[in-house]
Amino acid sequence: MLPPVSALQEFLDQSSVIWNAQDGKPAPNSQAALELANFSRPESIATAFSQAAMLFEAATDYSMALIKTLTEPAVAVAPWSCARCILETSALAAWLWDTKIAAIQRAQRSLALVYEGLEQKRKFATIANSDIDPNKVLQQIDEFEKVAQGLGFPAIIDKKNKRSGIARPMPSDTEIVKLMLDKESNYRLLSAMLHGHIWALQSLGFITVKENQNIFESVRGAYFEKHLTYLSIRYLCTEAVTSLSVPILMKFKLFGWDAKTMGSLIAKALKALEK
């Protein structure tokens, strides 16, 4: 296992030990505890925390998948997609665990995310031959909109006077990554790989092995092979650690947990990734 991959693996292993040493509940008088105690509908705050937890688990899962793609027999293209998913889910988790917002904004973000997911589920149910009833999904959306109205959020409608959100417009994933991780350019690069843009694939996942060859009759060109450089491996592992660190430290602060040990571990991992 290459040093950057080992550094990421060690970070995941040791951070999970520190994380699991917490009792899972917010400390007394922490921001999380106060929001749960004082918000008019504590279920909305608890839902936001649960959504963030699931998204963070997804981010760690993608990180483990990244390690597998970078371990022999390693692959050249798939690691970039894993890294992109790590950024996206880490940013969303941090967005919901954000310590710089009030409880009302946390509930608002949670409801916006719920709507986004249910609307995609409704569209899927409409075109897929499945057991999901799109009308029941629509009823779920209506119920969450009633919750939003009960919390005082205005209706979100488009120019055609149709519902386009709940509680607030849902930002794009790129906007959330920029806001929470400050990694817009990184995310766009990783997205280019995920979406199969040739310029990105040719630059990051392949290497020219033969130039000026007879590719087809009367057509000359180059032959390419899949290839992943050491610098790319280190970049991908660094992206994973720095992205995961944001929601980790956000939750520790929000829940009033001692983040000193976790902070030291993050610094250690980043130093190891410099090699």
Image (spheres, rainbow, N blue to C red):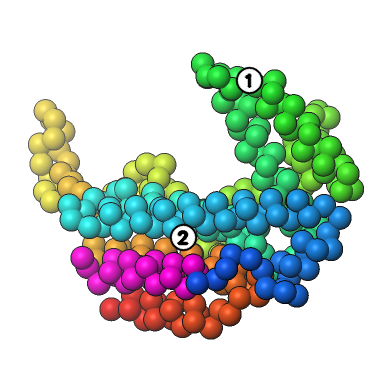
Q: For this rendering, which residue is in front, 41 or 24?
A: 24
Does 133 sit above or below residue 165?
Answer: above
User: What is the chief secondary structure element of the magenta stretch?
Assistant: helix
- Percent coordinates x, y for residue 204 in the rendering: 30, 55
List x then y, in percent, for residue 63. Answer: 39, 57
Circles 2 and 1 in contact, beta carbons < 8 Å: no
- Quadrant of the frame with the C terminus: bottom left
Q: What crowding class fits label 1: few (fewer than 14 Cα within 10 Å), some (14-19), or many (20 or more)?
A: some
Q: Quadrant of the N terminus?
A: bottom left
Residue 55: x and y in percent read 54, 52
> Element type at marker 1?
loop
Tell which tag, 2 or 1, sits nearer the viewer. Answer: 1
In-image side of 265 versus 170 (left or right): left
215, above or below 44, in the image? above
Magenta span includes 4:
yes
Residue 205: percent from left, percent from top: 27, 51
How far apart in space, not on screen, are marks 2 and 1 (Cα)?
38 Å
- Which residue bears the numbered disc 1? 133
- The residue lying at 78 percent from left, 31 percent from top is 142
Which residue occupies 38% across, 76% down? Answer: 269
Ranked by sequence position, the earlier of labels 2 and 1 is 1
Asked whether residue 187 is in view, the answer is: no
Identify residue for label 2: 186
Tell whether 217 sits left or right of 33: left
- Front residue of 48/166: it is 48
- Residue at 70 percent of width and 54 percent of height: 46
Q: Give the residues in magenta.
A: 1-20
